[in-house]
Amino acid sequence: MTAWLVVLLTPSTCLAVPDGTVLMMYADNVVGRVAQRITHDRYTHAAIVLRGEVYEATVPRVKKSVFVGYHHPKAHVFAYLPSRPFSAEEIDRMIQYAESHIGQPYGLKNYFWQNSEPDGRTWCSEFVRDVLNSSGRYHLSYGQGFEPQTLLITIGSEYSGPTVVSEPVYARPAF
């Protein structure tokens, strides 16, 4: 019985997600509230799942981690699943792009000053947008700041969700 409750209360361990699943997050803390005030969005972080790994631009660098058991201790994590599966070639292109950016520094300079010279840094939703663009299926605009919510609205007609992946411990019901 205890093992069943652990699986039930840890959705990411049993949630199977297709390649190209976009993860959206928000935090119920000071950092999350500041980010929400700046972006005017519910979501404050975005990531993408490819072949069972989560690729994300986060402080201090772009990284990847295993999806099984993925959670953020202080954020609500939701999955948006592609309505149409990506082809093997599209997935390969996305992985190649994402892998080539592992270790790239995180930064918001071009978010705040969109006309500034690129400095080799990226932020979360910009990174996910670029991974999706690398598939060849999307041609998402570079002419606007890309907050997580903007990304979700832009791809929304081709994605379904949200599905809860994980919630902070303090948000789970007590038994």
Image (tube, rainbow, N blue to C red):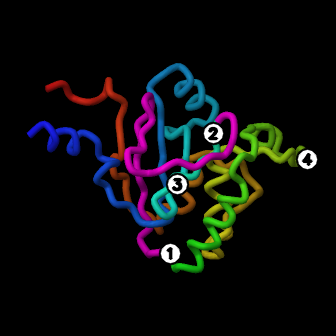
What residue would you read off at disc 1? 86
Task: Indicate which disc residue 58 carries.
Answer: 2
What residue would you read off at disc 4? 117
What residue would you read off at disc 3? 152
Give 164 or 115, whichever is nearer the viewer.
164
- Please state the extent of the stretch shown in magenta in the rendering: 59-86
Q: Earlier in the sequence, mark 1 or mark 3?
A: 1
Residue at the extreme left: 1
Q: Earlier in the sequence, mark 3 or mark 2?
A: 2
Spatial CA distance of label 2 from label 1 is 25 Å
Q: Quadrant of the C terminus?
A: top left
Numbered disc in front, either 2 or 4: 2
The amino acid type of the residue labelled 4 equals Glu
**Circle 3 — which element?**
helix
Q: Quadrant of the N terminus?
A: top left
**Circle 1 — which element?**
loop
Horizontally, is 84 left or right of 90 in the view? left
